[in-house]
Structure formats: structure tokens, C-alpha cells
Image (cartoon, rainbow, N blue to C red):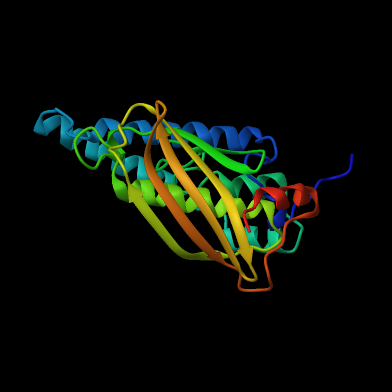
């Protein structure tokens, strides 16, 4: 059987390799720690119980520290050289903030490509609260930065955030499905302009516009997405 290798540019939204058994265990650990994040908020426990939990947490931290961590730089180097394994891909994406399925900082926010759009969905708990019962505006900004950046899956270059403008139209509630959507607007040389929106139960709560900058060469659509040219406004 021929081994499959991956390049960094091959990693697209919702198109990562099937997780290995080890990656599945990492995801389960991440979900469990995310649940602890929720439970520790205003935990109604006695002083003795809190001291016991602190000791247990310290013991777990010490036990995990003995295992060490895989070197991120080595993983990234293999992917940039086109020699990454499936586990290298999941090591990269599974621990991303908000979207990583193994990250205790993630709801997770699920992302996928649909036609000429990047779409997303997530349910945010108390750990992400700003105003009472509402999602923190900074978390929304982070989610939109991630979402709009994924419009680069349609193009051949990879860039960085130049500007991100956000208009908050209404409060975004916790504990309800939050829908995200982003699309390309146009390309101007090394600038990629896109827009995004946030919706809850059919109501738009946030609008955003962003510019991404390619450090190496002009943006252009990938050949497989050439038909999107008509969908990009002049």
C-alpha cells in the first residue's frame, strides 16, 4: 500500500484525513477538558472539595508533563516540505483554537466549504460568555478571523489578516446553534477581500468585512474553483 503524504497547502476545511485511533483519543481528552472548563465556572463546592480538586488537577498536570509533547516545528516542517503524514495534519488542525476537535478551548466550531462560501456552526457555552447569556464580542471576532481566513481555500496563495471590520447588530446568545458564513468579494493583486456574517435562528447578529494580504505573489483562484470567478463581484 502506498503511503499518502500531505503538503500544508493541501489542508482544506473539513477535508482532513480520517483520524487515527490516537487522534480520536486526543479528541476525547480535549472534549473532557472542555467540559471541565464549563464545570469550574462558579463551582459551588466547599473549601475542602476545592482543595481536593486542585490537588487532583496538579497530579494530572504532573503526570501529563512526564509524557512530553511532539515537536510542532518538526511537524510543520514536514507539511511545508510535502512530506506530512495524516497524523501530522490532525496534529496541526485538531489543536487549533475554537475549531480544533482536540482543543479544550474549542466548542468546537465546525467549518466546511459549500459552493462559493465557507460555512460554520457552533454552540458556545458559559466559558465564552461576555454579557450575561451572550457570546463575548471578542470570541465572535476570533471566530470571524478564522472563518474569513478559510476563504483562502479557494485560492492559490496563503496570506495573513490585514484588516477585520466587525459590526455587532444584536446579541449572540449562548447555548444555541450559531451559524457562520463567509465568501470572497474580490481579489486585488496581493489583497483578498471577503465578507462574513453570523446568524442565530434566522436573525443576523454580526456582519464583517476583511482583507487578507499575501506575502508572496498575487492571489488567484485555484483551477478547480475557476467557476467562482463569476461569483466574485468586480
Furthest residue to the front?
234
Please indicate whether residue 113 sits to the left or right of residue 135 in the image.
right
Q: Toward the viewer: 212 or 24?
A: 212
Pick whichever, 181 or 38, lies toward us.
181
Q: Quadrant of residue 23?
A: top right
Residue 84 placement, left or right of 174? right
Identify the residue shown where x is 52% and y is 35%: 27
Residue 9 or residue 23, whichever sits in front: 9
At which x and y percent is residue 117? Answer: 60, 42
> Residue 230: horizontal and vertical position, in percent?
71, 50
Q: Is residue 159 above or below residue 25?
A: below
Q: Quadrant of the N terminus?
A: top right
Q: Which residue is drawn at 72% across and 49% down?
A: 85
Q: Which residue is drawn at 27% across and 34% down?
A: 126
The quadrant of the picture occupied by the C terminus is bottom right
- Residue at image point 72% right, 53% down: 229
| Left or right of 35, for residue 4 | right
The relative height of residue 179 versus residue 222 in the rendered view (above or below) is above
Furthest residue in direction left, as rendered = 47
| Residue 70 location (% of width, % of height) | 57, 54
**How many numbered marks are there?**
0
Is 41 displayed left or right of 178 in the figure? Answer: left
Q: Is residue 77 visible?
A: yes
Whether residue 65 is visible to the viewer of this picture, yes or no, is no
Amino acid at each position: 500500500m502506498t503511503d499518502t503524504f500531505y503538503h500544508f497547502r493541501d489542508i482544506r476545511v473539513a477535508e482532513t484525513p480520517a483520524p487515527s485511533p490516537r487522534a480520536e483519543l486526543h479528541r476525547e481528552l480535549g472534549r473532557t477538558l472542555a467540559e471541565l472548563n464549563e464545570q469550574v465556572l462558579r463551582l459551588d463546592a466547599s473549601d475542602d472539595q476545592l482543595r481536593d480538586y486542585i490537588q487532583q488537577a496538579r497530579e494530572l498536570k504532573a503526570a501529563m508533563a512526564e509524557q512530553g509533547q511532539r515537536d510542532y516545528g518538526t511537524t510543520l516542517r514536514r507539511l511545508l516540505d510535502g512530506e506530512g503524514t495524516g497524523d501530522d495534519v490532525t496534529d496541526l488542525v485538531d489543536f487549533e483554537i475554537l475549531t480544533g476537535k482536540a482543543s479544550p478551548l474549542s466548542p468546537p466550531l465546525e467549518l466546511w466549504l459549500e459552493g462559493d462560501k465557507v460555512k460554520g456552526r457552533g454552540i458556545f457555552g458559559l466559558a465564552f460568555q461576555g454579557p450575561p447569556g451572550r457570546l463575548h464580542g471578542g470570541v465572535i471576532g476570533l471566530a470571524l478571523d478564522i472563518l474569513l481566513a478559510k476563504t483562502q481555500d479557494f485560492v492559490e496563495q496563503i496570506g495573513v489578516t490585514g484588516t477585520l471590520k466587525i459590526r455587532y447588530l444584536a446579541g449572540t446568545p449562548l447555548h444555541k446553534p450559531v451559524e457562520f458564513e463567509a465568501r470572497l468579494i474580490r481579489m486585488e493583486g496581493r489583497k483578498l477581500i471577503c465578507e462574513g456574517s453570523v446568524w442565530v435562528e434566522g436573525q443576523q447578529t454580526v456582519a464583517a468585512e476583511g482583507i487578507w494580504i499575501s506575502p508572496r505573489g498575487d492571489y488567484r483562484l485555484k483551477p478547480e474553483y475557476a467557476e467562482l470567478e463569476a461569483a466574485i463581484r468586480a
